Image (spheres, rainbow, N blue to C red):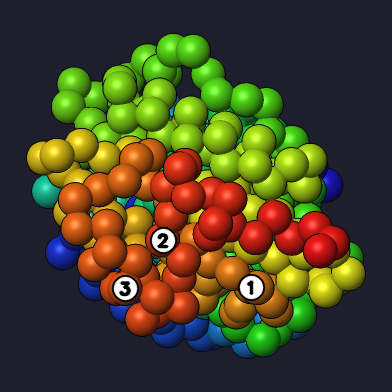
Amino acid sequence: MAAEIFVFAAAGTDARAHYERTILSPVPVEEIARHDPGIAAELSAAKHDSIRCWGSIPGPGNLRNWTRMQPGHWAMLYAGEGRFPYLLRVAYKARSRALAEHLWGGNPEGRTWELTYFFDEVREASLGIDDVRASLGYNEDWWPQGLQYPTPDHQAALLAKFGSLAAFVELASDGEQPIEVDEPEAGALLLGGPFKGAPSTPPKQRQSRPSDPDVAGRGYLAHEETVAGLAKHVGAGFRKGTPGINHDGGWPHDGSGAFSICEVKSINSRNEVGQLQKGLGQVLHNRFKAERHGIEVAAAYLIAEKEPANSELWQAVAAEHGVVFSWPERFELDVDTGGPA
């Protein structure tokens, strides 16, 4: 099966009550039978005694996406506050106003969430909005609404980064329940494609005032030029990072099975403290995610585009956390390329 993943939102007061009613607690099939015997018969035939479910209000977008959804597809649940706590596998779908009114009532316009879908596997996850945007290739202004089917281009972006939908589900899941996928090698999980060099122009921004200097204007170009300088120092082993770990780059250490990872930050005199604080938090988080997936991190680097004020302080703070702080003029001194001595 090609990548077919959906996103549905369960954010807001009413949605939270529905979430507690039919996602956190499975609904007994005998309860479903009292309101839609046909659905209950299908679920019973599939050996379900109880099942988790959700529903969407009919509308052009929801109906189109619900029609596309099929058993075996996966969905990411957005619970608000930038959190995606569950991935769920679709087992069955049916349109039932009577069942939806029983489970969730109706909205002030008299409509109900009658495009129902049921889940036979639920996996806990620790995905944030940035993880999901990076995995599907979305910009920073994307937020889940209703029932969404990411476009074929976004589905293809996920496949290109993870190899398969099953591999993404396995990587994103916190639970221990296994599924039948080929376990990705550490290198494939950590390292993306070959580094193609620094771009000459920043990407077009949809937001008028991006919150992260690394993604717009001069900051973007400085960030990418610093990555390019690091890639030149490291050599052919340097790769851009994957969304699974969400780091700026990494490289293997010959013969050891371990890897280095790095986080690169553009800075200026006004933002360097905030940028370096953010970067240190990111590299610590990325190291944790890598190690959680069984990847040995030989070294973690926080890289600035240039030497900041109080550089000795930043070196000491980073070292306290087992991170090497460096900038281009110090690459020869600080950065282990991972190759043979």
Task: Judge left or right: residue 310 versus residue 290.
Answer: left
Q: Is 167 or 104 nearer to us in this picture?
A: 167
What amino acid is labelled 2 in the image?
Phe
- Residue at label 2? 325
Which mark is on residue 129? none
**Residue at left offset 34%, top offset 56%:** 279
Categorize mark 1 by other alpha carbons within 10 Å: few (<14), some (14-19), many (20+): some
Task: Determine whether label 2 and label 3 are within 8 Å by CB.
Answer: no
Q: Which one is nearer the viewer's eye here, 136 or 188?
A: 188
Specify which label sits upstream in the sequence, 1 or 2.
1
- Residue type at mark 1? Val
Is 310 displayed left or right of 292 in the figure?
left
The crowding category of the residue bearing disc 3, from other C-alpha atoms within 10 Å (few below 14, some 14 to 19, many at least 20), is: some
Quadrant of residue 79 within the rendered picture: bottom left
Q: Which residue is mark 1?
A: 297
- Total marks placed: 3
Closer-to-camera residue (160/176): 160
Where does the image place residue 272, in percent across and percent down from the top left? Answer: 20, 47
| x 32%, y 78%: residue | 20
Q: With respect to residue 314, does 216 lie above or below?
A: above
Query: For this view, does 301 lie left or right of residue 238?
Result: left
Front-most of residues 281 and 242: 281
Residue that carries the numbered disc 3 in the rendered image? 316
Q: What's the residue type where badge 3 is placed?
A: Ala
